[in-house]
Amino acid sequence: MTSVAEHARDVRARGLTPVWACSAVAFLVVSLAIGVLSGPVDLGVGSVLESAGARLHLPGVSTSLSPTEEAILWEIRVPRVMLAALVGAMLAVAGATYQGVFRNPLADPYLLGVAAGAGLGATIAIAYLPDGLRGQRMLPVAAFVGGSVAVFLTYAVGRSARRERDAATLVLAGVTVTAFFTAWQTFVQQQNSETLQEVYSWILGNIPSTGWSDVVLVLPYIGVAVVVILALRRVIDVLNLGDDEAASLGVDVRRVRLALVVAATLGTAAAVAVTGLIGFVGIIVPHTIRLLTGVGYRALLPLSVVVGAGFLVLADVVARTVLAPAEIPLGVVTAFFGAPFFALVLRTTRGGTS
Amino acid sequence: MIGLSGVTVELGGRPVVDSVEAAVERGEWLALIGPNGAGKTTLLRAIARLVPFRGDISLAGRPSLELSRAELGRLVAVVPQEPSTPPWMTVAEYVLLGRTPHLGLLAKEGARDRDAAARALARLGLLPFVARRLGTLSGGEKQRVVVARALAQEASIVLLDEPTAALDIGHQQQALDLLDVLRQESGLTLVAAMHDLTLAAQYADRMLLLDGGRVVADGSPVDVLTEATIAEHYGAAIDVVDVGGRIAVIPRRPG
């Protein structure tokens, strides 16, 4: 049996290889740097590094930035980049999770109606809740409730309609639910025209420059969601074999799927609550990683977190620099690149599993 | 090893498996035979607890409903008729999935799991294939990989649904010979739904003939495969011939 024992070393699942892990982290670091350095005020690499060193109390380092520049860097740019990174990580990993759990390569928080449902929840919160309650704490809760209802409806409609396993059916169900929730949201919005501007800019999707408060607001939700999803990443590979086979391999399919869908929906809803509707990140990022590496979910999910963070930071840089000083809505930027990419994925998908 | 008592499965209000009584001994090879729609696959799914049933099913002396999913997975492995084989997955990754019932929900495979997978791969002559993607394998190779996954599961009961349906006659023999060797070496209990009666008669100790969800014959191949029973339950005209102590079923052109 020695030869078998020797071979046992080769019998392993491809986890995160150092090359891909380092490439993903390098991409994120470069993206964060570009994000922090781009903007109407040119701060310069050296000064930013000095300022960071001073903040970390490195001996002999003092900042050369003026107080105004310090404020721009630490109260506007860094929190905005952090928020973009958090939201990007969440949307990408949620997309990959939905794709694994529903065994559907076209699943994405935006296309499954989660975003529209969260949008309706948030709009109702903005329009109807009294000012005191409306404050930021209720917004993610309302968005989560709306998002959960939407993803449940999408799944139910898709299930009732599909005769065979077909990737497009679930997306069509998502489109249906999205249309319904969007109509409802528009109605609520028209009834409450004084909030129109607030709601409208929210719908288009933007990373707000509101300092650290939004970062602090979403961090716990996204943190918990990402931890849950990454902890269960091996099981998602098992779920990918289908319900029956996963069950016969000892997985309690309903419970695991519920945990994953709740985590992905909670995180997405929290992200959507502060940034509005940003589509296609959950399609672009996981599929690009799949094309490049061909790995299973156990490696795909952590890579999606890192690359998704970098991707949305870069997309946000595009959104705020292309027409500077005006900003393009971030949702417009991601859709501009995402829709053609979606078409490409659709072309290479033959109505089956991912 | 497996005890079935009054097992009934209803799908859409219609009993697909109806009051099945049977017992399977440790190390036995039981073939489930019967015409299309007789309930063979559904009975296998009930034993694996993949479909709700009435009646009692006991596995290794314990009621199946009292077992957790993971315990059930350590006891019963399933080789489905059309297993899902994601093309991007490597053979090693796929066979390691067989270790899932031995792992906690959050755990990773350890050295013991890799050993078990390597042994299963070695038994099926698949060690040279470990790094290959499933999408690059032939039908026969895929079938072996699925069996290797079931072996890596180290379950004492293996349920097979038409294990040879997709294989040519040479690969059919190889696959069934291999299962028979594994059964003898490891004391596996095999329950296989099979369409090919001659092949089933070559390998199975016992046959359970189902028709309309009910057991209509239970016994050795010689007892079950008679011209009269086949004519009655399959509506087929056949000759049963004895070839060196094993029986073969030969279709006869009517008229």
Image (spheres, helix red, strand yellow):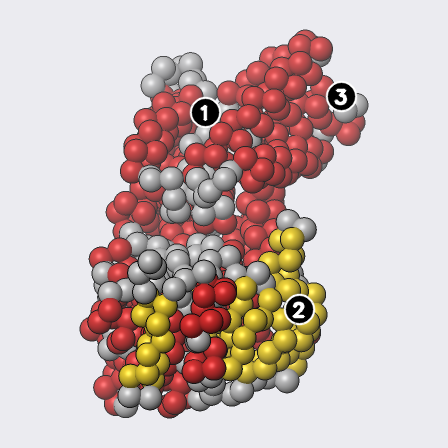
In the rendered view, tell whether residue B36 sits above or below residue A11.
above
Which of discs 3 and 2 lies nearer the camera? The answer is: 2
Q: How far apart are marks 3 and 2 (CA)?
A: 59 Å
Furthest-front residue in view? B255
State whether residue B189 appears in this view. Answer: no
Position of A283 compared to B24: left or right?
left
Q: In this view, does B189 lie to the left or right of B248?
A: right
Rendered image: mark on residue A123: none
Identified by mark 3, the residue type is: Tyr
Q: Which residue appears at 42% of the width and 14% of the height?
A: A326
How crowded pointer 3 is (Cα within 10 Å; few <14, some 14-19, many 20+) is rated as few
Q: In this view, does A55 lie above or below A133?
A: below
Res A125 → quadrant: top right
Instruction: Estimate how packed mark 2 is, as few (under 14), some (14 to 19) or many (20 or more) residues with alpha carbons within 10 Å.
Output: some
Residue A237 percent across, percent down from the top left? 43, 58
Mark 3 or mark 1: whose residue is earlier in sequence: 3
For numbered disc 3, what is the local secondary structure?
A: helix
Residue A296 seen in the figure: yes
What secondary structure is found at the residue carrying circle 1?
helix
Which residue, given by chain and number where applicable, does mark 3 sit on? A128
Numbered tag placed on residue A331 in the rendering: 1
Badge 3 vs badge 1, beta-carbon distance below 8 Å: no
Q: Name the residue under label 2.
A: B19
Q: Is residue A302 left or right of residue A71?
A: left
Secondary structure type for disc 2: strand
Query: Hey, which quadrant is residue A92 in on the image?
Result: top left
